[in-house]
Image (cartoon, helix red, strand yellow):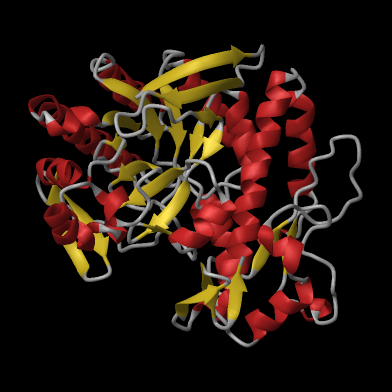
Amino acid sequence: MRFNIKQVNCGSERIGSLTGFIKSSKTIIETPTAALLTQGGSVVHLTAEVLAKVFPDTQLLWLPLSNSVQLENGVKAQGEGVAKFAGLPKHVICATLYNINEIVPPGHFELGKLPLWTKNGKKMITADKYMDLMETFKPDIILAASDGRISLNEKPKRIVKSVERTIALLDSCINKYKASEELQQSSLVGVIVAANIPHKCEECIRHILKYKETLVGVALAGLTDGSKESYEISLDKLKEIFSRVGGSLPNDLLRIVEGSWNPAVIVTAIEYGWDVFDGSYPIKLTNKGHALSLNFDVYRYSGDPCIMDLNDIRYNEDFKPILEGCECLTCKKHTRAYIRHLLNTREMLASVLLSIHNLHHFNEFFVQARLHISASTFNIYKKHIITQYENINPKLDNEENKTAPALVQDKKKIKVRIDDNVKTEVNGTIIE
């Protein structure tokens, strides 16, 4: 894989592209962008058929090993990688050790091993075992194993240990990567930790840059451990980190930010040259029954909230789409009242429809960002997005990530044939 920079503006924001994928040589993914979070190899809440209708083009998928390690035997038996096994062969897979946004017990480290918390409990994993799994899964991009599940509020002793482990794990991943012909089909990314202790962060960066010829990019972890408190960081603090860390990196490396950050944080990161985000934010909103409703017109701001809580009783008889003018499948066919009804009756279709909207709208947020970078008006766009989040009810955005009522039942999916076309039906509703 190659990362190409097309345009860099005076504020360091840039437009780039990911090309040269071994399995899909014609694929081009423009940056800045977000990956689509997967669980068990599938995009959260969406079947492969629905995903194809929401995003007809190739997408970047974020694959945490913690929720997909159970696929190992099946993927190995098939021998064609996790994308083909999951029914998503045309999409680009970015694999990482864990979903950094999941809350797990702290500690449990062993010498040379990391705890991998799965649905079946804790598994201890070495860097060599991780890379063996990557040989089986055959992702397009691999984030090196790291001790990155820490927040900016951690004590210095914990952060120092994180740097030591991350450096040692990177060495092991690099050695395994160089020795494997199979892994040469994938691109490797180093992981930066200790962002809030500058000299330790620089130590981590210097070690990563020793392998610059082997690595295609870097990922910034260690900002959050998934807890509510770890996301309560001032925008100024994050701005300083994005600026300082980004300024220490060569321009030709792809830059990834891990964490479920809202668009106000994302535009701040983009301003300092960060390219790819893990895409868990729209899923976080969906799981709470919330809909993203950003206003992209920088010359008009009505003061309407950029997040709607569709659990609210006020939407009982609101027969407008989630967002007027939105071109997603949900907004074209369904109303706020209907989705409120689905949430209230605990129907799994609520999560499907909300995901369709939130993922589409989140993707449009990045489309608009690229357009403004191209037009050299990104600073106006950034301020416009930040203003909308400054005016939001803090409880709405910072509320603990809990599961909405609509997500507690099993999803019922069947195939139906209509006019000789196979379509997907979820709880009695056909997704066109």
Q: Position of residue 159 (x, y in %)?
A: 32, 40
Horizontal side of residue 400 vs 311, given as left or right: left
Q: Position of residue 201 (x, y in %)?
A: 36, 27
**Image quarter (top left, top right, bottom left or bottom right) of the C terminus:** bottom right
| 324 or 32, nearer to the observer | 324
Task: Kindly identify the residue that appears in the image at 42 percent across and 46 percent down.
Answer: 61
**Image quarter (top left, top right, bottom left or bottom right) of the N terminus:** top left
Evaluate whether residue 264 shows in this view. Answer: no
Q: Quadrant of residue 269?
A: top right
Horizontal side of residue 412 vs 428, given as left or right: left
| 197 or 32, nearer to the observer | 32
Horizontal side of residue 145 vs 308, given as left or right: left
Evaluate whether residue 299 shows in this view. Answer: yes
Horizontal side of residue 343 vs 332, given as left or right: left
Task: Kindly identify the residue that appears in the image at 55 percent across and 68 percent down.
Answer: 287
Task: Kindly identify the residue that appears in the image at 66 percent across and 17 percent down.
Answer: 11
Above or below for 207 versus 225: above
Above or below for 170 versus 98: above
Q: Position of residue 244 (x, y in %)?
A: 50, 22
Q: Position of residue 385 (x, y in %)?
A: 75, 40
Q: How many marks?
A: 0
